[in-house]
Image (cartoon, rainbow, N blue to C red):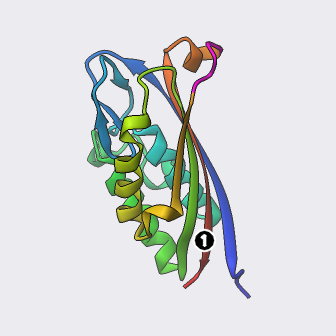
C-alpha cells in the first residue's frame, strides 16, 4: 500500500562567479555574479527538485539530470523542476506545499520574492500561497557568508491525487 502523503527535503549549493547570470526560482536577478554549474545552477529550484524526487524515493537530480549529459548544459532549472513534477505526478502524487530558504549575503532578494513564488507555483501546478520562499544571510560565516556561494534548502509535502 502506498502512503497517502510523502515529505522530502532538498539542498543545493553553487559557487558565485563573474560572467554568469544569477537565476533563482526561474527569475533572473540583477547582480555582478552568477552561479557556476552545468545547468543555469538555480540553487532554489535545485533544492526543490531534490525535495520532490526524495519525497517520491526517486533519487536525486544527479540521477535524472547528470552533469555528464550535454543535453542539460545551461538547461533551465525550471524545466528540470517541471520534469521532476511530472515524475511524481506519474506516481499519483501532487505537491501540496513547498517551504524553501535561499542563503545569500547579497543581493537582497526581497523585491523578487513574489515573482519567484509565482514562477515556482506555475511550474509545480499549485497556487502561490502553497509556495513559501525565504531569504537569509549566513552572517558572514563560511562560503555563503563570504559571498563565495549561494545555497538553497527546501521541504515539500506530496499527497495522493
Report how many numbered discs are placed on residues in the image: 1
Residue at left offset 58%, top offset 24%: 137
139 or 161: which is nearer to us? Answer: 139
Q: Mark 1 points at which residue?
A: 158
Relative height, residue 108 to residue 119 (above, below): above
Residue at left offset 44%, top offset 70%: 126
Q: Is residue 105 magenta?
A: no
- Which of the image's four quarters has the C terminus? bottom right
Residue at left offset 39%, top offset 46%: 25
Specify the quadrant of the image occupied by residue 52.
bottom right
Dot 1: element: strand
Q: Main secondary structure of the magenta part?
A: loop
Whether residue 115 is visible, yes or no, is yes
Relative height, residue 90 to residue 108 (above, below): below
Specify the quadrant of the image occupied by residue 125.
bottom left
Whether residue 60 is visible, yes or no, is no
Which residues, given as a range, are shown in magenta? 137-141
Q: In this view, does 133 lie to the left or right of 78?
A: right
156 or 62: which is nearer to us? Answer: 156
Q: Position of residue 78 (x, y in %)?
A: 35, 53
- Outermost bottom residue: 1
- Outermost front residue: 111
Q: Where is residue 14 in the image (x, y as percent from the top left)?
A: 48, 28
Residue at left offset 62%, top offset 22%: 138
Relative height, residue 71 to residue 130 (above, below): above
Relative height, residue 56 to residue 31 (above, below): below
**Mark 1 crowd level (few <14, some 14–19, many ≥20, 10 Å Cα):** many
- Which of the image's four quarters has the N terminus? bottom right
Q: Where is residue 134 in the image (x, y as percent from the top left)?
A: 54, 42
Amino acid at each position: 500500500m502506498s502512503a497517502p502523503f510523502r515529505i522530502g527535503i532538498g539542498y543545493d549549493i553553487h559557487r558565485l562567479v563573474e560572467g554568469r547570470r544569477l537565476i533563482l526560482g526561474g527569475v533572473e536577478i540583477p547582480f555582478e555574479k552568477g552561479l557556476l554549474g552545468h545547468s543555469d545552477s538555480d540553487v532554489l529550484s535545485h533544492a526543490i527538485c531534490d525535495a520532490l524526487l526524495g519525497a517520491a524515493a526517486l533519487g536525486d537530480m544527479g540521477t535524472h539530470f547528470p552533469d555528464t549529459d550535454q543535453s542539460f548544459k545551461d538547461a533551465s532549472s525550471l524545466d528540470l523542476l517541471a520534469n521532476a513534477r511530472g515524475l511524481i505526478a506519474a506516481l499519483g502524487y501532487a505537491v501540496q506545499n513547498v517551504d524553501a530558504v535561499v542563503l545569500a549575503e547579497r543581493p537582497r532578494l526581497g523585491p523578487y520574492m513574489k515573482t519567484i513564488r509565482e514562477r515556482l507555483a506555475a511550474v509545480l501546478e499549485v497556487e502561490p500561497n502553497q509556495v513559501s520562499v525565504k531569504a537569509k544571510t549566513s552572517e558572514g560565516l563560511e562560503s555563503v557568508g563570504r559571498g563565495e556561494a549561494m545555497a538553497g534548502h527546501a521541504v515539500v509535502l506530496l499527497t495522493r491525487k
